[in-house]
């Protein structure tokens, strides 16, 4: 169902993929858009095992498209160093393929927003995060992407450096 990566030496293992998803702060969510144009939007997220959570307003383009077709992809760029002397970049990125769901269950929605709030404001008190969530609860919509497939890839230069030094750059 999913294509194999052509440059297998550059493929990231699942541990590295999960590290990137855990520490990443944003990515680009791609949906099947209107008139057959892809619709891609930058968005913050949190990973919880084989699930990603996103937040948005209760109405809008994303929700309309998810209702039409819940299949989506999500790209997170971990690294992108420009090397002009070689006309290239040293990149590391992950692409997630999954099925989107608009959360209707109040407890699952609350758990998801709490995870998101903790990721982006870890030093804040639980009380402050709860107050923030309470104020924004009514207009809040939470989205869930169940991961169907995930790939990660890095520049060949990073692969070579890892082989030489024994550690990721």
Image (spheres, rainbow, N blue to C red):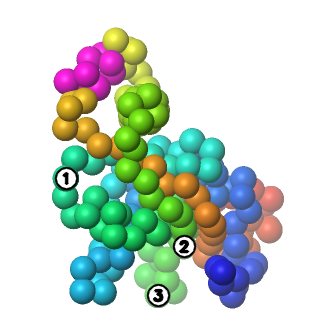
Question: Helix, strand or loop at disc 3?
Answer: loop
Q: Please state which of residues 168 and 122 is positioned toward the viewer in this rendering.
A: 122
Question: Helix, strand or loop at disc 1?
Answer: loop
Snapshot quadrant of residue 104: top left
Majority secondary structure in the magenta region: helix
Query: 44 above or below 7?
Result: above
Q: Which residues are magenta?
A: 128-135
Q: Which residue is mark 2?
A: 90
Residue appearing at x 27%, y 48% in the figure:
56
Distance of label 1 from label 2 (alpha carbons): 38 Å
Q: Is residue 123 visible?
A: yes
Q: Earlier in the sequence, mark 1 or mark 2?
A: 1
Q: Which residue is mark 3?
A: 87
Q: Is 29 within the magenta?
A: no
Distance of label 1 from label 3 (alpha carbons): 43 Å
- Mark 2 Cα-neighbour bin, 10 Å: few <14, some 14–19, many ≥20: some
Query: 149 above or below 49?
Result: below
Q: Which residue is mark 1?
A: 59
Q: Please state if 80 lies on the left or on the right of 57 as rendered.
A: right
Task: Please identify the quadrant where the C terminus is shown.
Answer: bottom right
């Amino acid at each position: 169902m999913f294509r194999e990566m052509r440059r297998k030496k550059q493929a990231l293992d699942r541990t590295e993929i999960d590290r990137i998803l855990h520490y990443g702060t944003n990515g680009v969510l791609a949906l099947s858009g209107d008139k057959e144009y892809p619709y891609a939007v930058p968005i913050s997220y949190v990973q919880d095992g084989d699930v990603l959570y996103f937040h948005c307003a209760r109405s809008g383009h994303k929700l309309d498209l998810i209702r039409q077709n819940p299949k989506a992809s999500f790209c997170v760029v971990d690294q992108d160093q420009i090397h002009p002397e070689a006309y290239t970049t040293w990149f590391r990125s992950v692409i997630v393929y999954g099925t989107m769901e608009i959360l209707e269950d109040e407890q699952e929605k609350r758990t998801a927003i709490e995870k998101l709030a903790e990721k982006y404001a870890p030093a804040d008190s639980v009380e402050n995060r709860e107050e923030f969530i309470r104020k924004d609860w009514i207009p809040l919509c939470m989205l869930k992407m169940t991961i169907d497939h995930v790939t990660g890839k890095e520049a060949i230069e990073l692969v070579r450096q890892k082989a030489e030094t024994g550690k990721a750059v």
